[in-house]
């Protein structure tokens, strides 16, 4: 799968990030980060709110097939988000997932 451009994966974004999306606060899982590592034919992702480590926060991992990720990216391209715009706790969760 093709990684999002440097425009979106800016600053100190880990290389393991494929794409980042922000739904603008319309749901509890506001931010979605897809990981570039495709193993067993699936793409892993994490969906989270701005405080995934808070007891009342949200952070959940999932898997999609590459064609489902491609469809998601096609339909949600206007919701692309920059790495630098993610809250610090979201960045921390992604770094922990990627062990960076």
Image: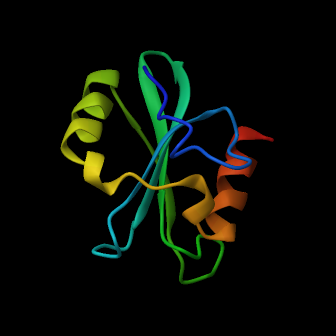
Q: What is the residue that sits farthest to the right in this orientation?
A: 100
Identity of the residue drawn at 67% across and 69% down: 89
Identified at 19% across, 43% down, the residue is 75
Query: What colour scheme governs how the chains and residues are painted in the rendered image of this protein?
Result: rainbow
Query: Residue extending furthest bottom?
Result: 56
- From the top left corner, tell me how far across and down residue 85 is, in percent: 56, 64
Residue 11 spot, x, y in % from top left: 70, 50
- Furthest residue in direction top, as rendered: 40
> Quadrant of the image for the N terminus?
top left
Is residue 26 toward the left or the right of residue 41 in the image? left
Q: Nearer the viewer, residue 95 or 60?
A: 95
The total number of labels drawn is 0
Look at 62% across and 59% down and name the residue there. Answer: 84
Position of residue 6 relative to residue 23, above or below, is: above
Task: Tell me where residue 97 sits by quadrant.
Answer: top right
> Is residue 57 shown left or right of residue 24?
right
Most foreground residue, 55 or 79: 79
Residue 18, horizontal then vertical, whole percent: 51, 34
Residue at image location 48% in from the left, 16% down from the top: 40
Q: Quadrant of the C terminus?
A: top right
As displayed, is residue 37 above or below residue 86?
above
| Above or below: residue 50 compared with residue 39 | below
- Compared across the picture, whether 8 is left or right of 78 comes to right
């Amino acid at each position: 799968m093709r990684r999002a451009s440097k425009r979106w994966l800016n600053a100190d974004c880990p290389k393991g990030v494929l794409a980042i999306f922000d739904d603008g606060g319309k749901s509890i899982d506001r931010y979605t980060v897809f990981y570039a590592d495709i193993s067993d034919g699936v793409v892993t992702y994490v969906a989270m709110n701005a405080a995934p480590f808070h007891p009342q926060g949200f952070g959940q991992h999932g898997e999609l097939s590459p064609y489902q990720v491609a469809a998601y990216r096609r339909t949600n391209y206007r919701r692309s988000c920059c790495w630098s715009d993610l809250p610090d706790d979201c960045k921390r969760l992604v770094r922990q997932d990627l062990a960076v």
